[in-house]
DNA sequence: CGTTAAACGAGACGGTACGTCAAGTCTTTTC
DNA sequence: GAAAAGACTTGACGTACCGTCTCGTTTAACG
């Protein structure tokens, strides 16, 4: 049995330097050109220190991203103006806007590509980033159901996926122009289908 | 300027052997473990012959997939039973079923990951595979509009994306179980929103 | 049996262009960086045309050199001033001088290196270049024997080698400075040993 | 400036395995067919380990030869029987004999060819192998001068070159048969020229 | 608080694959 | 039918990183 390293003795400084270096190099060169040696060199760290704490390049990048995103986005409850249509439009336009930002675009594409080959990463991504985000949306939808703005017999989690799915599809596959107008149309058609039956 | 090779002199035999080898190795080992050297060895071909005609590993794989899929899926018009709900359920269940097939799943994930870093590939994929498939669906939707099963003021192309988006989202991000039931629900809610207004 | 090409149909133009290109590239880049492809490209000739008529890169270079040297140096009888010492000094100083010329130095080193791995080339070199040169010297020595300037019981061919050997040794191995003074000393000591016995 | 590796960390085992493999392959296949990849494979070593410590194939071979020859030939003082003629005959016959041994012949031709294109190697060869050997000879000649067997006004280093030069010339250029008799004749004529004047 | 075992930086190691270059062979087209 | 053009298989090149493995050097938990 290979002896596991002792987390208590772990150098916080090394960890931070590694994640920072990973983030910087990822932005500069992209995932494909990112190397463990490069991260180690930039971080001023021995390669072994990386291998000691992470199983793969993907895991490092993933941690680096969580480190960056997690700090800002812990609590992202949706706004509630009283009009669910307005609120959904706001959140979906925000999603589109982020996708149009070159840096965020690159990071998200990188991680989306990466999880295709690593189900464990995929699960962690869903649990720690996507899940919370979609839960915030389905929470807002449930609130709308309670005030009678949406049919009450609809699964809010499914509805959230009906909302984000098309945007994600268009972004990832570039099937057409991705803009605020597209986001609005998705919300409009979706709400038509989710409206309470007369 | 590096002189381009003359396509007239290209060896068909080499091309076919390369694409076949790529497909086999991709299924056996996955994209990450796929190497140019491996393809060349399996195909009984010099590495230079690959480099002469393709700019990257991704391009080879892409051609290999088009070669395989394109031959079978030229004409994929949707069925038209007269009931658009039934037909959409059929096509979406078919899509889900293909995603559940391990081989197809791996190939599709590979190529989806690949196009994230190569917009040119992405465009080609849309034009040659995704586009035709989505057009077939939107054609069927337009037919439904003409017989009054769907509201006539809705963009059929957008509707097709509303349909495939959620399925694609769940498959790619593994946000939940992907099965026929999920496909049915997507169709149901979508049609509710697209129904002609009284 | 592989059919031999017909020398009668050989293109003189191609032959000359190849040998010229070889000579030029040899001077520009040296033997190690000389390639068949480079020669073919420079000569505006197909590679096959080179392979058809020469068995190896060394053979081409060799022909190229013979073509260049042979034309100028067919008849190189030594001067005969009546004083064999003066004449030997002249010829040895000339040899040294040529070795100090950078272009000639490179060509000679190239071919000397090459014949180490190719006895057939070595033989041809001796027969067509070195042999005639040394024969000219031994002829002069024999003439000296006839007029009593040298002991008559000495093999003139051996004596020629005693003369050129040390110069060649110092040039090839760089064991010390190679100059006219060195040449003179070699001649002086050699003649002392070859003088007629009282 | 590319960072130089740290000699303290160098693996002795790898170094020895590389030099041994180089020597073996050189004997088996000759210099032209010798490859870095072949050496690495035979030595059970990564190619990078060779490139880390040697700049070229020639340098490896050179080190391999020094490693082999240097160990046996550190001290090669010439015999001193009292008769300089006998001693020179012995050493020159020994030189000829070694040149007639196929393995030694191949090694020496290889390295002689190699130093033509690499003056740095040439200098090292002279300093570490040829130099000591010729010094041993000139030492013996000086001893002969002291006891009056040779003229005292002759440069012993030059004399040594007069001795080895012709043998080397005949061996390298194959201008004639190389045997003990030839060695004897060289010594005889040389001594005639170097004898003390009456 | 000093000891001491661990984590650390550094980097050499055996490997794999890269993308390039040239070798020598083969085929197609031109003169 | 030789020659030009150039695509082909082969194999070595020298480079970049991989993940493993020592090395000395900090450094932080515990005796």
Image (cartoon, coloured by chain):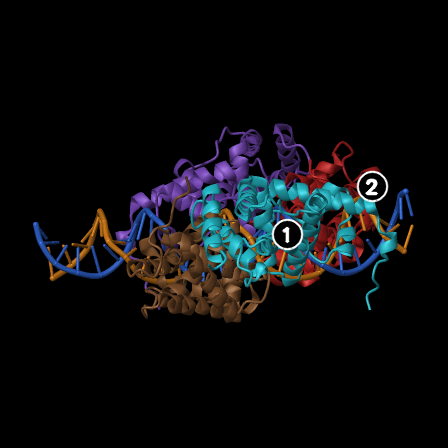
Chain colours: A purple, B red, C cyan, D brown, E blue, F orange
In this orientation, does residue B176 appear? Answer: no
Image mark for residue B143: 2
Image mark for residue B167: none
- In the visual, does D77 lie left or right of B194? left
What residue lies at 32% left-to-right and 45% top-to-bottom?
A14
Q: Is residue A154 above or below residue A96?
A: below
Q: In terms of image quadrants, where is residue B163?
A: top right
Helix, strand or loop at mark 2: helix
- Where is the N terminus of chain C found, in terms of image quarters? bottom right
- In the visual, does A76 lie left or right of C9? left
The one nearer the camera, C169 or C184, is C184
Image location of residue E16, percent across then percent down = 54, 60
What residue lies at 73% left-to-right and 46% top-to-bottom?
C19
Provide the chain ID for the residue under circle 2: B
What residue lies at 32% left-to-right and 70% top-to-bottom?
D81
Q: Which residue is mark 1?
A: C136
Q: Is residue A198 above or below residue F10?
A: above
Q: Nearer the viewer, mark 2 or mark 1?
A: 1
Image location of residue B188, percent across then percent down = 68, 47
In this orientation, does residue D59 appear? Answer: yes
């Amino acid at each position: 049995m290979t002896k596991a390293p002792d987390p208590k003795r772990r150098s916080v400084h090394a960890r931070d330097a590694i994640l920072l270096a990973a983030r910087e190099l990822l932005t500069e060169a992209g995932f494909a050109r990112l190397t463990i040696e490069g991260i180690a060199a930039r971080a001023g760290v021995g390669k072994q220190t990386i291998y000691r704490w992470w199983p793969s390049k993907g895991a490092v990048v993933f941690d680096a991203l969580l480190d960056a995103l997690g700090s800002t986005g812990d609590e992202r409850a949706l706004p509630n103006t009283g009009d669910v249509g307005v609120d959904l439009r706001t959140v979906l336009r925000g999603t589109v806007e982020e996708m149009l930002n070159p840096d965020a675009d690159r990071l998200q594409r990188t991680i989306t590509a990466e999880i295709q080959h690593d189900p464990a990463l995929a699960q962690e991504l869903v649990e720690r980033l996507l899940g919370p985000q979609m839960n915030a949306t389905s929470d807002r939808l449930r609130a709308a159901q309670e005030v009678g703005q949406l049919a009450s017999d609809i699964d809010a989690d499914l509805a959230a996926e009906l909302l984000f799915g098309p945007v994600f599809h268009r972004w990832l596959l570039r099937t057409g122009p991705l803009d605020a107008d597209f986001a609005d149309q998705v919300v409009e058609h979706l709400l038509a289908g989710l409206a309470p039956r007369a």
